[in-house]
Amino acid sequence: MTIPASVLVVGASVGGLAVVEALRREGYTGALTLLGAERHPPYDRPPLSKKVLSGAWEPDRTRLRQDAALAQLAATMILGEQAVHLDVLGRAVTTASGRRLTAEAIVIATGLEPRRLPGQEPWAGVHVLRTLDDAVALRADLLAGSQVVVVGDGVLGAEAAATARGMGRAVTLVGPQSTLLASQLGPQIGGYLAELHQRQGVQLRLGVAVEALVGDGERVRGVRLADGELLPAEVVVVAIGSRPATDWLTDSGLRLADGVVCDSRCRAAEGIYAVGDVARWHHEGLGTALRLENRSNAVEQGAAVAANIVGKDRPYAPVPFFWTDQYEVKIQVHGWAPADAQVAIVEGSPEAGQFAALYGSGGKVVGVLGWNMVKQTRSLRQHVVERTDWSLVKSLRAS
């Protein structure tokens, strides 16, 4: 394999930056360009819904690297320019301003776009939370308003609700699932998280859909649910999921199906790769296509793509990992938590506020969750890697 003389990374968030840094660590000496749609230098997204929103961090603290560290990468950074077209055969990207950038290899790292409620755009006081600017705008409204409705019962919605409640706001969280984070944690442990929010004073309206936003013509004043209930609101946070940012690729010829479809090397076409939230790649260990939305995956996948660009030809087959911090609780998950999985608490207890649990499916351990148990969770991860027989879990609990 011939190592490309130039690489263009489209997307200047954690995944894109991870590719550039990993290429330099691999000894790559070719030309590197990092193209980002936002005006900000690469920054970290997980703190947005917690540290930035609460005011614990100034926005600039989210920067992933300071100017001196970025300069050492010897990469051309083009910020505030959105990619609008990819020419696969010509290995070229056109931006909204008409600029045409070429490279021998291109990495797509454009991430996600937040989903919105129908008709939400005209209303002041209604927010999504994806970018640094989103977090700053939402914080300003939270400081001015006392009644908050969060629409969305996943990770982002739960984190935003926890932060708003920590700021002393009256918070109601609405979502269609039976409990919080049911699709990520399963019903049992999702139920523990729901109980935590209720103890902190969050009002939950779960298992119900939003019918409409209501207001005075300019600013939102409430959220009407499908069952007819009207929830007063001065601020509404819409956290109903995201979709891969692939609109700019619709005429590229790449295969798009819930992301950019790639092989096990994260390659979408000859000389074209994808990383992070936007990449849907073939996981050889699972024998299926997979797309993961978390920071850890973006970093690891960026390193894997860099290795493949320089000719190492390695499949990317990680054990998925994500975490969430809510109130004083840190939840970490390695592997998977299928909705129908068996759950066994093997260390600690929910009553004590610290525990570790294993998830079982198909007779094997497929996931581990830690609730304020960082060290133990890391140790138990090996059972996911080794796919320990579920029949052995009882003895683990006893020991």
Image: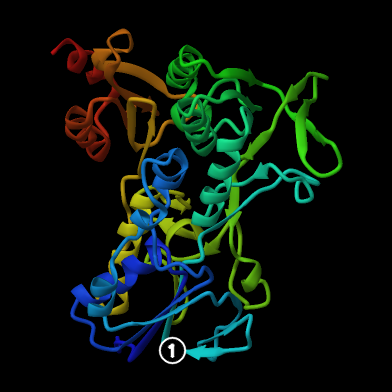
Q: Position of residue 311 (x, y in %)?
A: 26, 79
Q: What residue would you read off at disc 1?
A: 103
Left-right relation of 371 to 326? left
Q: Quadrant of the C terminus?
A: top left
Query: Which residue is at a point 42% across and 41% down the rendered structure image?
Result: 55
Q: Position of residue 9 (x, y in %)?
A: 42, 76
Left-right relation of 190 to 115? left
Query: Which residue is at a point 53% across and 34% down the rendered structure image?
Result: 154
Q: In the figure, 162 relative to 111: above or below?
A: above
Task: Give the number of marks.
Answer: 1
Q: In the figure, 14 relative to 52: above or below?
A: below
Query: Which residue is at a point 28% across and 89% down the rendered structure image?
Result: 30
Residue lying furthest front in this view?
144
Residue lying furthest left in this view?
399
Residue lying furthest top in this view?
351
Is residue 125 visible in the rendered image? The answer is yes
Query: Which residue is at a point 23% across and 35% down the rendered structure image?
Result: 381
Q: Quadrant of residue 118?
A: top right
48 or 242: which is nearer to us? 48
Q: In the figure, 285 relative to 206: above or below?
A: below
The amino acid marked with disc number 1 is Ala
Q: Residues within 10 Å of mark 1 (few under 14, many from 20)?
A: many
65 or 305: which is nearer to us? 65
Q: Quadrant of residue 72?
A: bottom left
Quick one: SS at disc 1?
loop
